């Protein structure tokens, strides 16, 4: 069966849709994104940032100084096994 323009009648009824999303929901999301102002990012407390960086700078060295040579060796062996044992 053909329609007036030569296309099979009911052809589109049997074709699966490419997208399962509702076009109205997509349009609403785009409209919302375009019309809303950008949300303000919360500012960080400069004193807290400086304190956190200070602790981060000395943390690794302080931990290494507190470990014994044997414990450092065990940690290194475990890290090497985890890295190279994946093959």
Image: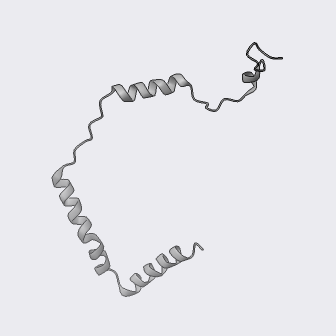
Q: Name the residue nearer the viewer: 11 or 39.
A: 11
Name the outermost residue toward the left: 47
Q: Position of residue 52 (x, y in %)?
A: 23, 60
Figure colour scheme: one colour
Relative placement, left or right, of 66 versus 15 is left
Relative placement, left or right, of 29 versus 65 is right
Q: How many marks?
A: 0
Q: Which of the 4 image quarters holds residue 42?
A: top left
Q: Position of residue 43 (x, y in %)?
A: 22, 44
The quadrant of the image that shows the N terminus is top right
Relative placement, left or right, of 16 versus 70 is right
Q: Position of residue 64 (x, y in %)?
A: 31, 78
The quadrant of the image that shows the C terminus is bottom right
Q: Name the residue nearer the viewer: 11 or 56.
A: 11
Name the outermost residue toward the right: 1
Residue drawn at the location 33% of the way across and 27% of the way down: 36
Q: Position of residue 46 (x, y in %)?
A: 17, 52
* Up-down relation of residue 77 to residue 47 (above or below): below
Relative placement, left or right, of 83 versus 6 is left
* Up-down relation of residue 8 to residue 84 (above or below): above
Q: Name the residue nearer the viewer: 19 or 2.
A: 2
Residue drawn at the location 31% of the way across and 75% of the way down: 63
Name the outermost residue toward the top: 4
Residue drawn at the location 54% of the way across and 24% of the way down: 23
Q: Which of the 4 image quarters holds residue 11?
A: top right
């Amino acid at each position: 069966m053909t329609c007036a323009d030569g296309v099979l009648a009911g052809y589109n009824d049997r074709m699966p849709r490419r997208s399962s999303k509702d076009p109205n929901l997509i349009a609403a999301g785009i409209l919302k994104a375009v019309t809303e102002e950008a949300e303000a990012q919360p500012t960080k407390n400069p004193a807290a940032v400086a304190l956190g960086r200070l602790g981060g700078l000395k943390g690794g060295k302080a931990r290494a100084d507190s470990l014994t040579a044997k414990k450092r060796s065990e940690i290194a062996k475990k890290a090497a096994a985890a890295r190279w044992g994946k093959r």
